[in-house]
Amino acid sequence: MATPIGSTKTEEIVCIVARTKPSGYNVFSLKETSTEEHKSFQLSSHQAADLSQSLLDEFLIDEIPEYLRSSPARRVHVVVSTQSGTGLALDFYNAVLNPLLQSLGLSSAEKNRDLLGLPANTTDGNSYDLTITQDAQSIRKFAKELNQGVRGQEPGHTVILLSGDGGVVEMLNGKERGDGGNESRELPPLIAILPLGTGNALFHSLHKPIHASHGSSQVSALVLGLRTLLRGHGAPLPSFSASFSPGSGSVSYSNSDATDPAPSPEGVEEHFDSISHLYGAIVASYGFHSQLVWESDTPEYRKHGDKRFGMVAAELLKESHAYNTTVQLTYTDGSTPQQLDRDQHAYVLATMVSNLEKAFTISPASKPLDGKLRLVHFGAVSGQKTMDIMMQAYAGGKHVGMQWTTDDGKEEQVGYDEIQEVKVTTLEEDARWRKVCIDGAIVELPRGGSMVVKTEEISHLQILVDRSLKPI
Ligand SMILES: Nc1ncnc2c1ncn2[C@@H]1O[C@H](COP(=O)(O)OP(=O)(O)OP(=O)(O)O)[C@@H](O)[C@H]1O
């Protein structure tokens, strides 16, 4: 819908700022243009003498919110994850976020330092620290540094994260368990997500009710992210812990030639680092989902953005591997753990969010911030059946409760349970089929090894959400 401000559409408006001389308003909007090859961003500012009360109610920012102002009690950071999604985070920072913040009087401390001779860790209320990732460790290192303040005297931190879900999980795991870290903080770091990853599950799930309230008008995820950044409020981010049996290791890849942007498979090195636990806020899975995340996360597939999942899924569905595993659930009433009545599984996925992608509703009952862990599971089925179930998840979460009769006459269904804890024990011989996924990170379990996932009582991060969302 066009507004009284030139050709600016309401769905493109990011914010409105009042002006005094001459009196009126500046309306900031974002236009995104995509071609097969390229996506570009254009931030515009239009002046308007007068605007309707409804536009002002929705978009006016009277003052820079407290969480974006640096002070002795708070430091503001921007983290640009250059490899997230299809690698657009730095373009977005340069074309949109940096000029927008600058128009609001906020600029990077690096720039202030250059211009004004200020130290990088200035507490000037108008500046933020800028981190541009250089490698796969950059965000973890950044998160660790945030946690190194003097106990009881740390300032609060606001982190504007230009990344996908991986950036959030790296922030969540930026401290060692029991090292004091966030647990000693009255308020853990506040994260504002600008969704520049592939799935952006956490962002889409937190913004689902906001999308729904816009009806048919198409507000892009990045416009929504900027609106939340400027007019949101902080809430505790519910999370879970995943503990792995001894012998488990996180699996990651690096490019042996850092200057080669598209290395051949021979140019990619696999790393296996022992791991005992991870925190997550989105998903812990074993079976088809973890396999898909793992096998699609190569530099070659990454070039295809979210299409990479479909490409790898087609291959995996042809194999339709049946995972030899036992799954034990503890329900929220605390009753004794129960083992699922099958020893071969296709899909075991515990989640705290509704959507793994904007259009993929894995857990329709999950509400933003509800803190509930839900398990979606089904036994070994054909590739075609797995495909049918996944398509129903793309149809708004209709896979839940799907039932069918197997060739040997057994009644089967997609299980969906609210749980307190789940223990998955793999009985697979081949390491290929022993990969679990925690919010996109891959962990290989040893033969006979297990993963235990349970909800966390304390919150490790705060998350910026739309004003209309309240912690449940
Ligand atoms: N310069 C870099 N070199 C290597 N790795 C990087 C670099 N910059 C960021 N990374 C890593 O790339 C990963 C990107 O993951 P992220 O989740 O943000 O994107 P995604 O996987 O495309 O999206 P999603 O998880 O939402 O599907 C992160 O683990 C991050 O630490």
Image (cartoon, grey):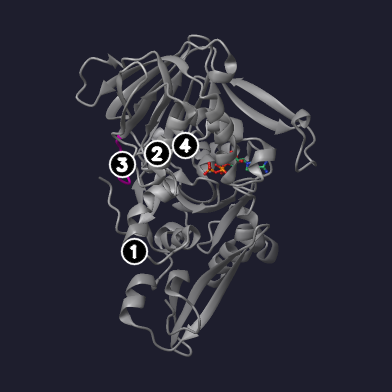
Q: Quadrant of residue 263?
A: top right
Calculate the distance from the C-alpha at mark 1 to the C-alpha at mark 4.
Answer: 33 Å
Q: Quadrant of residue 61?
A: bottom left
| SS type, badge 3 | loop
Calculate the distance from the C-alpha at mark 4 to the C-alpha at mark 2.
Answer: 14 Å
* Quadrant of the snapshot with the C terminus: top left
The amino acid pointed to by label 1 is: Gly
Query: Residue shown at 38%/53% (left/top)?
Result: 207
Residue for badge 2: 185
Q: Quadrant of residue 251?
A: top right
Closer to the N terminus: mark 1 or mark 3?
1
- Mark 2 or 3: in front is 3
Query: Residue shown at 28%/34% (left/top)?
Result: 401
Which numbered disc covers residue 366?
3
Q: Is residue 342 left or right of residue 338?
A: right
Closer to the N terminus: mark 2 or mark 3?
2
Instruction: From the top left corner, tell me how far across and down residue 93 is, in percent.
Output: 60, 59
| SS type, badge 4 | helix
The amino acid pointed to by label 4 is: Leu
Bounds of the magenta segment: 365-372
Calculate the distance from the C-alpha at mark 1 to the C-alpha at mark 3.
Answer: 20 Å
Residue for badge 4: 172
Q: Residues within 10 Å of mark 1 (few under 14, many from 20)?
A: few
| SS type, badge 2 | loop
